[in-house]
Amino acid sequence: MRAFAALYAALDETTRTGEKVAAIRAYLAAVPPEDAAWAVYFLIGRKPRQAVSTRKLRAWVSEAAGVSEWLFDECHEAVGDLAETAALLLPPPTRTTSMPLHRWVEERLLPLAGKDEAAQKADLRAAWDELDRNERLVFHKLITGAFRVGVSQRLVIAALAELGELAPATVAHRLMGAWQPSAAQFRGLVAAESDQPTTSRPYPFLLAHPLEGDPAELGPRDDWQAEWKFDGIRAQLVRRGGQLFVWSRGEELIGERFPELAPVAGRLSEGTVLDGELLPWRGADILPFAELQRRIGRKNLSRTLLAEVPVTFLAFDVLEAFGRDLRERPLGERRPILEQLLAPLVGDVLRLSPVVAAPTWRELAELRQGSRARNVEGLMLKRKAAPYGVGRVRGDWWKWKLDPLAVDAVLVYAQSGSGRRASLFTDYTFAVWQDGALVPFCKAYSGLTDAELAEVDRFVRGHTLERFGPVRAVTPELVFEIGFEGIARSRRHKSGVAVRFPRILRWRRDKQPADADHLEALEALLGARS
DNA sequence: GTACGTGCTTC
DNA sequence: CTCGGAA
DNA sequence: TTCCGAGGAAGCACGTAC
Protein backbone atom coordinates (compact mmCIF):
# COMPACT_ATOMS: atom_id res chain seq x y z
CA MET A 1 0.00 0.00 0.00
CA ARG A 2 2.86 2.35 0.82
CA ALA A 3 4.52 1.76 -2.55
CA PHE A 4 1.24 2.30 -4.40
CA ALA A 5 0.57 5.51 -2.49
CA ALA A 6 4.10 6.65 -3.37
CA LEU A 7 3.43 5.86 -7.03
CA TYR A 8 0.21 7.84 -6.87
CA ALA A 9 2.05 10.81 -5.37
CA ALA A 10 4.80 10.56 -8.00
CA LEU A 11 2.25 10.48 -10.83
CA ASP A 12 0.42 13.40 -9.31
CA GLU A 13 3.57 15.48 -9.07
CA THR A 14 4.67 15.40 -12.67
CA THR A 15 2.88 16.06 -15.92
CA ARG A 16 5.73 14.62 -17.99
CA THR A 17 4.54 11.46 -19.61
CA GLY A 18 8.03 9.99 -19.83
CA GLU A 19 8.48 10.24 -16.08
CA LYS A 20 5.06 8.76 -15.50
CA VAL A 21 5.73 5.75 -17.68
CA ALA A 22 9.07 5.21 -15.93
CA ALA A 23 7.42 5.45 -12.50
CA ILE A 24 4.68 2.99 -13.42
CA ARG A 25 7.13 0.59 -14.97
CA ALA A 26 9.45 0.70 -11.96
CA TYR A 27 6.53 0.11 -9.62
CA LEU A 28 5.14 -2.82 -11.61
CA ALA A 29 8.57 -4.43 -11.82
CA ALA A 30 9.25 -4.04 -8.11
CA VAL A 31 6.05 -5.29 -6.48
CA PRO A 32 4.59 -8.82 -6.35
CA PRO A 33 2.46 -9.65 -9.40
CA GLU A 34 -0.79 -9.67 -7.43
CA ASP A 35 -0.11 -6.09 -6.38
CA ALA A 36 0.85 -5.15 -9.93
CA ALA A 37 -2.41 -6.63 -11.20
CA TRP A 38 -4.50 -4.46 -8.89
CA ALA A 39 -2.39 -1.41 -9.65
CA VAL A 40 -2.99 -1.87 -13.39
CA TYR A 41 -6.66 -2.38 -12.72
CA PHE A 42 -6.96 0.91 -10.85
CA LEU A 43 -4.58 2.89 -13.03
CA ILE A 44 -6.53 2.21 -16.22
CA GLY A 45 -9.63 3.49 -14.49
CA ARG A 46 -11.42 0.33 -13.43
CA LYS A 47 -12.99 0.28 -10.04
CA PRO A 48 -15.07 -1.93 -7.83
CA ARG A 49 -18.51 -0.62 -6.95
CA GLN A 50 -18.39 2.22 -4.51
CA ALA A 51 -18.26 0.73 -1.01
CA VAL A 52 -19.00 3.76 1.16
CA SER A 53 -21.10 6.73 0.10
CA THR A 54 -19.46 10.14 0.15
CA ARG A 55 -22.11 11.21 2.61
CA LYS A 56 -21.09 8.63 5.18
CA LEU A 57 -17.42 9.27 4.62
CA ARG A 58 -17.99 12.96 5.25
CA ALA A 59 -19.95 12.28 8.43
CA TRP A 60 -17.46 9.79 9.86
CA VAL A 61 -14.39 11.82 9.00
CA SER A 62 -15.92 14.92 10.59
CA GLU A 63 -16.65 12.93 13.73
CA ALA A 64 -13.18 11.36 13.89
CA ALA A 65 -11.48 14.68 13.23
CA GLY A 66 -13.64 16.57 15.66
CA VAL A 67 -14.90 19.11 13.16
CA SER A 68 -18.46 19.97 12.28
CA GLU A 69 -19.81 18.95 8.90
CA TRP A 70 -20.13 22.50 7.67
CA LEU A 71 -16.45 23.06 8.43
CA PHE A 72 -15.69 19.87 6.52
CA ASP A 73 -17.66 21.26 3.60
CA GLU A 74 -15.79 24.56 3.75
CA CYS A 75 -12.49 22.68 3.71
CA HIS A 76 -13.74 20.50 0.87
CA GLU A 77 -14.62 23.55 -1.17
CA ALA A 78 -11.18 25.05 -0.57
CA VAL A 79 -9.28 21.82 -1.24
CA GLY A 80 -11.52 20.81 -4.11
CA ASP A 81 -11.21 17.09 -3.52
CA LEU A 82 -13.17 14.99 -1.04
CA ALA A 83 -10.62 12.19 -0.55
CA GLU A 84 -7.84 14.68 0.04
CA THR A 85 -9.90 16.79 2.43
CA ALA A 86 -10.67 13.68 4.46
CA ALA A 87 -7.04 12.59 4.46
CA LEU A 88 -5.88 15.99 5.68
CA LEU A 89 -8.47 16.51 8.40
CA LEU A 90 -8.06 13.18 10.17
CA PRO A 91 -5.77 12.94 13.21
CA PRO A 92 -2.38 11.31 12.53
CA PRO A 93 -2.18 7.50 12.70
CA THR A 94 -0.70 5.78 15.73
CA ARG A 95 0.53 2.75 13.79
CA THR A 96 1.98 1.92 10.40
CA THR A 97 1.25 -0.91 8.02
CA SER A 98 3.29 -2.96 5.62
CA MET A 99 0.31 -4.83 4.23
CA PRO A 100 0.66 -5.07 0.43
CA LEU A 101 -1.83 -3.49 -1.94
CA HIS A 102 -3.63 -6.69 -2.94
CA ARG A 103 -4.33 -7.59 0.66
CA TRP A 104 -5.62 -4.12 1.41
CA VAL A 105 -7.93 -4.39 -1.55
CA GLU A 106 -9.06 -7.96 -1.05
CA GLU A 107 -9.23 -8.06 2.75
CA ARG A 108 -10.02 -4.51 3.76
CA LEU A 109 -11.61 -2.72 0.85
CA LEU A 110 -13.81 -5.15 -1.09
CA PRO A 111 -15.45 -6.63 2.04
CA LEU A 112 -16.58 -3.16 3.13
CA ALA A 113 -19.40 -3.23 0.59
CA GLY A 114 -21.16 -6.13 2.26
CA LYS A 115 -21.01 -4.85 5.82
CA ASP A 116 -23.51 -2.88 7.87
CA GLU A 117 -22.91 0.72 8.74
CA ALA A 118 -21.45 0.17 12.19
CA ALA A 119 -18.95 -2.36 10.88
CA GLN A 120 -17.99 -0.11 7.99
CA LYS A 121 -17.35 2.74 10.36
CA ALA A 122 -15.25 0.56 12.66
CA ASP A 123 -13.23 -0.71 9.69
CA LEU A 124 -12.59 2.78 8.43
CA ARG A 125 -11.46 3.98 11.85
CA ALA A 126 -9.07 1.06 12.09
CA ALA A 127 -7.74 1.82 8.61
CA TRP A 128 -7.24 5.51 9.36
CA ASP A 129 -5.14 4.60 12.36
CA GLU A 130 -2.75 2.57 10.19
CA LEU A 131 -2.42 4.77 7.11
CA ASP A 132 -0.38 7.89 6.64
CA ARG A 133 -1.64 10.88 4.73
CA ASN A 134 -0.70 9.67 1.25
CA GLU A 135 -2.01 6.18 1.87
CA ARG A 136 -5.29 7.53 3.19
CA LEU A 137 -5.72 9.69 0.14
CA VAL A 138 -5.41 6.66 -2.10
CA PHE A 139 -7.58 4.57 0.20
CA HIS A 140 -10.33 7.19 0.16
CA LYS A 141 -10.18 7.49 -3.58
CA LEU A 142 -10.55 3.75 -3.90
CA ILE A 143 -13.51 3.46 -1.54
CA THR A 144 -15.37 6.40 -2.98
CA GLY A 145 -14.74 5.24 -6.51
CA ALA A 146 -13.11 8.56 -7.36
CA PHE A 147 -9.75 7.06 -8.19
CA ARG A 148 -8.44 8.94 -11.16
CA VAL A 149 -4.84 9.92 -11.65
CA GLY A 150 -3.13 12.00 -14.25
CA VAL A 151 -2.38 8.88 -16.15
CA SER A 152 -4.55 6.91 -18.39
CA GLN A 153 -4.76 3.71 -20.28
CA ARG A 154 -2.14 4.72 -22.79
CA LEU A 155 0.70 5.34 -20.32
CA VAL A 156 -0.06 2.17 -18.41
CA ILE A 157 -0.03 0.32 -21.71
CA ALA A 158 3.30 1.89 -22.60
CA ALA A 159 4.77 0.82 -19.25
CA LEU A 160 3.43 -2.73 -19.59
CA ALA A 161 4.66 -2.95 -23.18
CA GLU A 162 8.18 -1.96 -22.09
CA LEU A 163 8.06 -4.41 -19.23
CA GLY A 164 6.98 -7.35 -21.36
CA GLU A 165 8.81 -6.22 -24.50
CA LEU A 166 5.51 -6.30 -26.36
CA ALA A 167 3.77 -4.11 -28.91
CA PRO A 168 1.47 -1.60 -27.17
CA ALA A 169 -1.42 -2.81 -29.33
CA THR A 170 -0.98 -6.32 -27.93
CA VAL A 171 -1.17 -5.05 -24.39
CA ALA A 172 -4.15 -2.84 -25.23
CA HIS A 173 -5.99 -5.85 -26.59
CA ARG A 174 -5.16 -7.96 -23.55
CA LEU A 175 -6.56 -5.29 -21.25
CA MET A 176 -9.93 -5.32 -23.01
CA GLY A 177 -13.06 -6.90 -21.65
CA ALA A 178 -13.69 -8.51 -18.31
CA TRP A 179 -10.80 -9.74 -16.16
CA GLN A 180 -10.08 -10.16 -12.48
CA PRO A 181 -6.76 -8.93 -11.08
CA SER A 182 -4.54 -11.79 -9.93
CA ALA A 183 -0.92 -12.85 -10.07
CA ALA A 184 -1.64 -15.19 -12.98
CA GLN A 185 -3.57 -12.52 -14.85
CA PHE A 186 -0.70 -10.05 -14.50
CA ARG A 187 1.86 -12.59 -15.68
CA GLY A 188 -0.37 -13.30 -18.69
CA LEU A 189 -0.53 -9.61 -19.40
CA VAL A 190 3.22 -9.21 -19.84
CA ALA A 191 4.11 -12.70 -21.10
CA ALA A 192 5.29 -13.21 -24.69
CA GLU A 193 2.43 -15.64 -25.25
CA SER A 194 -0.64 -15.09 -23.13
CA ASP A 195 -2.58 -18.10 -21.89
CA GLN A 196 -5.43 -16.03 -20.48
CA PRO A 197 -8.88 -16.95 -21.75
CA THR A 198 -9.91 -14.82 -24.70
CA THR A 199 -13.28 -16.14 -25.77
CA SER A 200 -15.30 -13.05 -24.91
CA ARG A 201 -12.53 -10.47 -25.36
CA PRO A 202 -13.36 -7.53 -27.62
CA TYR A 203 -10.88 -5.49 -29.67
CA PRO A 204 -9.99 -1.90 -28.77
CA PHE A 205 -12.43 0.45 -30.50
CA LEU A 206 -11.10 2.65 -33.27
CA LEU A 207 -12.22 6.22 -32.62
CA ALA A 208 -12.64 9.17 -34.96
CA HIS A 209 -11.39 12.74 -34.87
CA PRO A 210 -13.59 15.73 -35.54
CA LEU A 211 -13.08 17.12 -39.01
CA GLU A 212 -12.43 20.82 -39.11
CA GLY A 213 -12.37 22.57 -42.41
CA ASP A 214 -12.94 21.32 -45.90
CA PRO A 215 -13.02 17.56 -46.58
CA ALA A 216 -11.59 18.26 -50.02
CA GLU A 217 -8.25 18.64 -48.20
CA LEU A 218 -8.43 14.92 -47.46
CA GLY A 219 -7.67 14.18 -51.09
CA PRO A 220 -9.69 12.41 -53.79
CA ARG A 221 -13.27 11.61 -52.82
CA ASP A 222 -12.76 8.11 -54.10
CA ASP A 223 -10.14 7.34 -51.45
CA TRP A 224 -12.81 7.72 -48.80
CA GLN A 225 -15.84 5.79 -47.67
CA ALA A 226 -18.66 7.98 -46.35
CA GLU A 227 -21.29 6.73 -43.91
CA TRP A 228 -23.87 8.45 -41.76
CA LYS A 229 -22.87 9.20 -38.21
CA PHE A 230 -25.68 7.50 -36.34
CA ASP A 231 -26.70 8.58 -32.86
CA GLY A 232 -26.71 5.45 -30.78
CA ILE A 233 -24.41 3.35 -28.63
CA ARG A 234 -21.15 2.06 -30.06
CA ALA A 235 -20.93 -1.68 -29.62
CA GLN A 236 -18.95 -4.73 -30.61
CA LEU A 237 -20.58 -8.09 -31.28
CA VAL A 238 -18.32 -10.98 -30.45
CA ARG A 239 -19.44 -14.39 -31.68
CA ARG A 240 -17.08 -17.01 -30.28
CA GLY A 241 -17.21 -20.28 -28.38
CA GLY A 242 -20.81 -20.80 -29.41
CA GLN A 243 -21.78 -17.67 -27.51
CA LEU A 244 -22.62 -14.07 -28.30
CA PHE A 245 -21.05 -11.19 -26.37
CA VAL A 246 -22.11 -7.60 -26.79
CA TRP A 247 -19.59 -5.02 -25.54
CA SER A 248 -20.10 -1.31 -25.03
CA ARG A 249 -17.38 1.29 -25.53
CA GLY A 250 -16.98 1.38 -21.75
CA GLU A 251 -16.20 -2.35 -21.98
CA GLU A 252 -19.36 -3.46 -20.26
CA LEU A 253 -21.16 -6.61 -21.32
CA ILE A 254 -24.54 -5.27 -22.36
CA GLY A 255 -26.02 -8.23 -24.22
CA GLU A 256 -28.65 -8.91 -21.58
CA ARG A 257 -30.10 -5.46 -22.06
CA PHE A 258 -30.67 -6.13 -25.75
CA PRO A 259 -32.26 -9.57 -25.88
CA GLU A 260 -33.50 -9.13 -29.43
CA LEU A 261 -29.95 -9.40 -30.76
CA ALA A 262 -29.11 -12.96 -29.77
CA PRO A 263 -31.53 -14.89 -32.00
CA VAL A 264 -30.17 -13.20 -35.11
CA ALA A 265 -26.58 -12.36 -34.22
CA GLY A 266 -26.23 -15.81 -32.75
CA ARG A 267 -26.44 -17.12 -36.31
CA LEU A 268 -23.23 -15.37 -37.29
CA SER A 269 -20.56 -17.94 -37.99
CA GLU A 270 -18.16 -18.89 -35.23
CA GLY A 271 -15.23 -16.49 -34.86
CA THR A 272 -16.91 -13.28 -36.00
CA VAL A 273 -16.45 -9.83 -34.47
CA LEU A 274 -18.45 -6.86 -35.74
CA ASP A 275 -18.15 -3.19 -34.90
CA GLY A 276 -21.24 -1.03 -35.09
CA GLU A 277 -23.88 1.05 -33.42
CA LEU A 278 -26.92 0.05 -31.39
CA LEU A 279 -29.87 2.13 -32.51
CA PRO A 280 -33.49 2.55 -31.50
CA TRP A 281 -35.27 1.81 -34.75
CA ARG A 282 -38.97 1.30 -35.28
CA GLY A 283 -40.36 0.51 -38.69
CA ALA A 284 -38.61 2.82 -41.12
CA ASP A 285 -37.59 5.37 -38.47
CA ILE A 286 -34.56 5.89 -36.35
CA LEU A 287 -35.80 7.08 -32.98
CA PRO A 288 -34.12 9.83 -30.94
CA PHE A 289 -31.25 8.87 -28.67
CA ALA A 290 -33.43 9.65 -25.63
CA GLU A 291 -35.56 6.61 -26.49
CA LEU A 292 -32.52 4.36 -26.45
CA GLN A 293 -31.58 5.68 -23.04
CA ARG A 294 -34.71 4.09 -21.65
CA ARG A 295 -33.16 0.74 -22.53
CA ILE A 296 -29.81 1.39 -20.83
CA GLY A 297 -29.10 0.36 -17.26
CA ARG A 298 -32.58 -0.94 -16.72
CA LYS A 299 -33.11 -4.08 -14.68
CA ASN A 300 -36.52 -5.11 -15.90
CA LEU A 301 -37.22 -4.94 -19.58
CA SER A 302 -40.96 -4.91 -20.01
CA ARG A 303 -42.66 -6.28 -23.11
CA THR A 304 -44.10 -2.83 -23.67
CA LEU A 305 -40.69 -1.19 -23.69
CA LEU A 306 -39.24 -3.79 -26.01
CA ALA A 307 -42.09 -3.10 -28.41
CA GLU A 308 -41.87 0.67 -28.02
CA VAL A 309 -38.14 0.93 -28.49
CA PRO A 310 -36.89 -1.92 -30.66
CA VAL A 311 -33.15 -1.96 -31.02
CA THR A 312 -31.11 -2.77 -34.06
CA PHE A 313 -27.39 -3.39 -34.47
CA LEU A 314 -26.10 -1.45 -37.41
CA ALA A 315 -22.80 -3.03 -38.43
CA PHE A 316 -20.12 -0.89 -40.04
CA ASP A 317 -17.00 -2.99 -39.77
CA VAL A 318 -15.74 -6.53 -39.38
CA LEU A 319 -12.70 -7.09 -37.14
CA GLU A 320 -12.63 -10.85 -37.16
CA ALA A 321 -14.07 -13.44 -39.53
CA PHE A 322 -13.78 -17.21 -39.34
CA GLY A 323 -11.52 -16.73 -36.33
CA ARG A 324 -9.05 -14.56 -38.24
CA ASP A 325 -8.08 -11.07 -37.05
CA LEU A 326 -8.78 -8.78 -40.01
CA ARG A 327 -7.71 -5.51 -38.48
CA GLU A 328 -4.57 -5.17 -40.55
CA ARG A 329 -6.53 -5.44 -43.80
CA PRO A 330 -7.60 -2.15 -45.37
CA LEU A 331 -11.20 -1.03 -45.01
CA GLY A 332 -11.63 -1.54 -48.75
CA GLU A 333 -11.11 -5.26 -48.18
CA ARG A 334 -13.01 -5.51 -44.92
CA ARG A 335 -16.15 -3.89 -46.30
CA PRO A 336 -16.98 -6.60 -48.91
CA ILE A 337 -16.32 -9.28 -46.31
CA LEU A 338 -18.74 -7.51 -43.96
CA GLU A 339 -21.37 -7.30 -46.68
CA GLN A 340 -20.97 -10.96 -47.47
CA LEU A 341 -21.17 -12.08 -43.84
CA LEU A 342 -24.25 -10.02 -43.16
CA ALA A 343 -26.20 -10.64 -46.35
CA PRO A 344 -28.12 -13.70 -45.14
CA LEU A 345 -28.95 -12.13 -41.77
CA VAL A 346 -29.94 -8.58 -42.59
CA GLY A 347 -33.35 -7.60 -41.27
CA ASP A 348 -34.90 -5.61 -38.43
CA VAL A 349 -32.30 -6.72 -35.91
CA LEU A 350 -29.10 -6.69 -37.91
CA ARG A 351 -28.42 -4.02 -40.50
CA LEU A 352 -25.55 -2.87 -42.62
CA SER A 353 -24.43 0.74 -42.38
CA PRO A 354 -25.05 2.04 -45.88
CA VAL A 355 -22.21 3.63 -47.80
CA VAL A 356 -23.27 7.15 -48.72
CA ALA A 357 -22.95 7.40 -52.45
CA ALA A 358 -22.18 10.98 -53.40
CA PRO A 359 -19.59 11.07 -56.16
CA THR A 360 -18.06 14.43 -55.20
CA TRP A 361 -17.22 16.22 -51.97
CA ARG A 362 -19.65 18.96 -52.93
CA GLU A 363 -22.53 16.56 -53.36
CA LEU A 364 -21.60 14.87 -50.10
CA ALA A 365 -21.65 18.23 -48.35
CA GLU A 366 -25.16 18.80 -49.66
CA LEU A 367 -26.35 15.46 -48.34
CA ARG A 368 -24.81 16.28 -44.96
CA GLN A 369 -27.12 19.27 -44.67
CA GLY A 370 -30.03 16.84 -44.47
CA SER A 371 -28.60 15.03 -41.44
CA ARG A 372 -30.98 16.45 -38.86
CA ALA A 373 -34.02 15.32 -40.82
CA ARG A 374 -32.59 11.79 -40.90
CA ASN A 375 -31.92 11.79 -37.14
CA VAL A 376 -28.19 11.41 -37.71
CA GLU A 377 -25.39 13.63 -36.46
CA GLY A 378 -23.59 14.08 -39.74
CA LEU A 379 -21.17 11.96 -41.71
CA MET A 380 -18.26 9.65 -41.04
CA LEU A 381 -15.35 9.67 -43.47
CA LYS A 382 -13.15 6.58 -43.45
CA ARG A 383 -10.02 6.11 -45.52
CA LYS A 384 -10.48 3.04 -47.67
CA ALA A 385 -6.79 2.12 -47.42
CA ALA A 386 -6.74 2.29 -43.62
CA PRO A 387 -6.38 -0.70 -41.31
CA TYR A 388 -8.54 -0.87 -38.18
CA GLY A 389 -6.06 0.80 -35.83
CA VAL A 390 -5.91 0.91 -32.06
CA GLY A 391 -7.41 3.92 -30.33
CA ARG A 392 -7.79 7.35 -31.87
CA VAL A 393 -5.59 7.20 -34.95
CA ARG A 394 -5.43 10.55 -36.65
CA GLY A 395 -6.08 10.74 -40.35
CA ASP A 396 -8.03 7.54 -40.98
CA TRP A 397 -11.46 8.14 -39.48
CA TRP A 398 -13.09 11.56 -39.37
CA LYS A 399 -16.45 12.57 -37.95
CA TRP A 400 -17.94 15.39 -39.97
CA LYS A 401 -20.76 16.55 -37.75
CA LEU A 402 -23.35 19.16 -38.51
CA ASP A 403 -22.50 22.69 -37.45
CA PRO A 404 -23.82 23.31 -33.94
CA LEU A 405 -26.96 25.28 -33.20
CA ALA A 406 -26.36 28.46 -31.26
CA VAL A 407 -28.02 31.25 -29.28
CA ASP A 408 -26.78 34.28 -27.35
CA ALA A 409 -27.38 33.90 -23.63
CA VAL A 410 -26.75 35.79 -20.40
CA LEU A 411 -24.62 34.55 -17.51
CA VAL A 412 -26.88 34.39 -14.44
CA TYR A 413 -25.31 31.99 -11.92
CA ALA A 414 -21.78 30.91 -11.14
CA GLN A 415 -20.33 28.19 -8.96
CA SER A 416 -16.78 27.24 -8.11
CA GLY A 417 -15.21 24.34 -9.96
CA SER A 418 -13.45 21.37 -8.41
CA GLY A 419 -9.94 19.97 -8.45
CA ARG A 420 -7.60 22.48 -10.04
CA ARG A 421 -10.45 24.88 -10.54
CA ALA A 422 -11.52 24.75 -6.89
CA SER A 423 -10.64 28.37 -6.17
CA LEU A 424 -12.31 29.88 -9.24
CA PHE A 425 -15.90 30.44 -10.27
CA THR A 426 -15.78 28.42 -13.47
CA ASP A 427 -19.16 26.76 -13.55
CA TYR A 428 -21.77 28.88 -15.29
CA THR A 429 -25.51 28.83 -15.81
CA PHE A 430 -26.91 30.66 -18.82
CA ALA A 431 -30.34 32.10 -19.46
CA VAL A 432 -32.45 33.55 -22.26
CA TRP A 433 -35.35 35.98 -22.09
CA GLN A 434 -38.95 35.02 -21.56
CA ASP A 435 -41.60 37.66 -20.86
CA GLY A 436 -39.04 40.14 -19.59
CA ALA A 437 -37.33 37.63 -17.28
CA LEU A 438 -34.21 35.53 -17.74
CA VAL A 439 -34.84 31.78 -17.63
CA PRO A 440 -31.90 29.37 -17.30
CA PHE A 441 -31.55 26.71 -19.97
CA CYS A 442 -28.08 25.23 -19.63
CA LYS A 443 -24.76 25.10 -17.82
CA ALA A 444 -21.40 25.27 -19.50
CA TYR A 445 -17.83 26.25 -18.89
CA SER A 446 -15.88 24.72 -21.72
CA GLY A 447 -14.92 27.00 -24.54
CA LEU A 448 -13.32 29.80 -22.53
CA THR A 449 -9.57 30.16 -22.22
CA ASP A 450 -7.92 30.29 -18.80
CA ALA A 451 -7.50 34.03 -19.18
CA GLU A 452 -11.19 34.52 -19.94
CA LEU A 453 -12.12 32.24 -17.06
CA ALA A 454 -10.05 34.38 -14.71
CA GLU A 455 -11.78 37.47 -16.03
CA VAL A 456 -15.25 36.03 -15.53
CA ASP A 457 -14.22 34.85 -12.07
CA ARG A 458 -13.31 38.43 -11.17
CA PHE A 459 -16.62 39.64 -12.54
CA VAL A 460 -18.53 37.12 -10.42
CA ARG A 461 -16.77 38.21 -7.24
CA GLY A 462 -17.57 41.82 -7.94
CA HIS A 463 -21.15 41.36 -9.08
CA THR A 464 -22.71 38.84 -6.71
CA LEU A 465 -26.39 39.56 -6.08
CA GLU A 466 -27.20 36.64 -3.84
CA ARG A 467 -25.68 33.42 -2.49
CA PHE A 468 -27.34 30.02 -2.38
CA GLY A 469 -24.74 27.81 -0.71
CA PRO A 470 -21.91 27.51 -3.22
CA VAL A 471 -23.95 29.12 -5.99
CA ARG A 472 -23.90 32.85 -6.68
CA ALA A 473 -26.46 34.81 -8.60
CA VAL A 474 -24.71 37.55 -10.54
CA THR A 475 -25.85 40.74 -12.24
CA PRO A 476 -27.01 39.78 -15.71
CA GLU A 477 -24.43 41.65 -17.77
CA LEU A 478 -22.25 39.24 -19.68
CA VAL A 479 -23.43 37.73 -22.95
CA PHE A 480 -22.04 34.56 -24.50
CA GLU A 481 -22.79 32.64 -27.63
CA ILE A 482 -23.71 29.11 -26.56
CA GLY A 483 -23.41 26.27 -29.04
CA PHE A 484 -25.12 22.86 -28.81
CA GLU A 485 -25.89 19.84 -30.94
CA GLY A 486 -29.55 19.36 -30.28
CA ILE A 487 -32.44 20.48 -28.17
CA ALA A 488 -35.29 18.75 -26.37
CA ARG A 489 -38.02 19.34 -23.79
CA SER A 490 -36.80 19.03 -20.23
CA ARG A 491 -37.92 19.57 -16.68
CA ARG A 492 -34.42 20.20 -15.46
CA HIS A 493 -34.24 23.87 -16.35
CA LYS A 494 -36.81 26.59 -15.82
CA SER A 495 -36.91 27.25 -19.54
CA GLY A 496 -38.45 23.81 -20.18
CA VAL A 497 -35.79 22.89 -22.72
CA ALA A 498 -32.39 21.25 -22.47
CA VAL A 499 -29.59 21.28 -24.99
CA ARG A 500 -27.11 18.56 -25.83
CA PHE A 501 -23.36 19.12 -25.50
CA PRO A 502 -23.60 22.79 -24.57
CA ARG A 503 -20.40 24.83 -24.74
CA ILE A 504 -19.38 28.44 -24.97
CA LEU A 505 -18.59 29.37 -28.55
CA ARG A 506 -17.45 32.92 -27.76
CA TRP A 507 -17.81 35.80 -25.42
CA ARG A 508 -20.02 38.46 -27.02
CA ARG A 509 -18.42 41.52 -25.49
CA ASP A 510 -20.13 43.48 -28.23
CA LYS A 511 -23.59 42.63 -26.92
CA GLN A 512 -25.75 43.92 -24.10
CA PRO A 513 -27.93 41.54 -22.07
CA ALA A 514 -30.96 43.01 -23.81
CA ASP A 515 -29.51 41.76 -27.11
CA ALA A 516 -29.51 38.15 -25.92
CA ASP A 517 -31.91 35.66 -27.48
CA HIS A 518 -35.43 34.91 -26.32
CA LEU A 519 -36.89 31.55 -25.42
CA GLU A 520 -38.76 31.69 -28.72
CA ALA A 521 -35.45 31.25 -30.51
CA LEU A 522 -34.90 27.99 -28.66
CA GLU A 523 -38.50 26.92 -29.20
CA ALA A 524 -38.05 27.55 -32.90
CA LEU A 525 -35.02 25.25 -32.97
CA LEU A 526 -37.05 22.67 -31.09
CA GLY A 527 -39.75 22.84 -33.71
CA ALA A 528 -37.25 22.77 -36.54
CA ARG A 529 -36.21 19.23 -35.65
CA SER A 530 -37.90 16.78 -37.93
C1' DG B 1 -45.43 5.34 0.20
C1' DT B 2 -43.43 9.36 -2.30
C1' DA B 3 -39.67 12.68 -3.28
C1' DC B 4 -35.17 13.71 -3.79
C1' DG B 5 -30.19 13.18 -4.08
C1' DT B 6 -26.16 10.24 -5.44
C1' DG B 7 -23.95 6.94 -8.40
C1' DC B 8 -23.14 5.14 -12.80
C1' DT B 9 -23.68 4.56 -17.58
C1' DT B 10 -24.39 6.50 -22.38
C1' DC B 11 -23.49 10.34 -25.54
C1' DC C 1 -20.08 13.89 -25.89
C1' DT C 2 -16.98 19.17 -25.83
C1' DC C 3 -13.20 22.05 -25.14
C1' DG C 4 -8.48 24.24 -23.87
C1' DG C 5 -3.94 23.33 -22.18
C1' DA C 6 0.29 20.99 -21.98
C1' DA C 7 3.95 17.84 -23.40
C1' DT D 1 -0.22 15.90 -32.62
C1' DT D 2 -1.84 13.48 -28.88
C1' DC D 3 -3.51 13.03 -24.43
C1' DC D 4 -5.71 14.62 -20.19
C1' DG D 5 -8.87 16.70 -17.08
C1' DA D 6 -12.31 19.84 -16.55
C1' DG D 7 -17.12 19.91 -17.62
C1' DG D 8 -22.57 19.15 -19.80
C1' DA D 9 -27.55 16.31 -20.41
C1' DA D 10 -30.24 12.13 -19.84
C1' DG D 11 -32.37 7.75 -17.60
C1' DC D 12 -32.44 4.09 -14.19
C1' DA D 13 -31.22 2.00 -9.58
C1' DC D 14 -30.76 2.61 -4.94
C1' DG D 15 -30.78 4.67 -0.51
C1' DT D 16 -32.36 8.30 2.67
C1' DA D 17 -35.66 11.80 4.32
C1' DC D 18 -40.08 12.90 5.21
Image (cartoon, coloured by chain):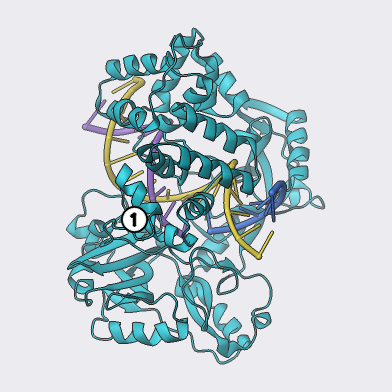
Chain colours: A cyan, B purple, C blue, D yellow
The chain letter for the residue carrying disc 1 is A
> Residue A82's spot in the image, x, y percent?
51, 27
| Residue at the image point whose x is 52% and y is 83% from the top | A385
> Residue A109's spot in the image, x, y percent?
34, 28
**Going by the image, does D18 lie left or right of A385?**
left
Task: Please tell me which residue lies in front, C3 or A143.
Answer: A143
Q: Quadrant of the N terminus of chain A?
A: top left
Q: Report how many numbered discs are placed on residues in the image.
A: 1
Task: Please tell me which residue lies in front, A383 or A353.
Answer: A383
**Going by the image, does A253 lie left or right of A60?**
left
Callout 1 crowding tier (Cα within 10 Å): few <14, some 14–19, many ≥20: some
**Does residue A180 appear anywhere in the picture?**
no
| Residue at the image point whose x is 45% and y is 27% from the top | A140
**Going by the image, does A462 lie left or right of A442?**
right
**Does residue A58 appear anywhere in the picture?**
yes
> Residue A291's spot in the image, x, y percent?
35, 60
> Residue A292's spot in the image, x, y percent?
35, 60
Circle 1 sits on which residue?
Answer: A177
Amino acid at the residue labelled 1: Gly
| Residue at the image point whose x is 35% and y is 85% from the top | A337
**Is residue A458 shown above or below A284?**
above
| Residue at the image point whose x is 55% and y is 14% from the top | A71
Task: Please tell me which residue lies in front, A345 or A269.
Answer: A269
Q: Residue furthest right?
A: A510
Task: Please tell me which residue lies in front, A392 or A154.
Answer: A154
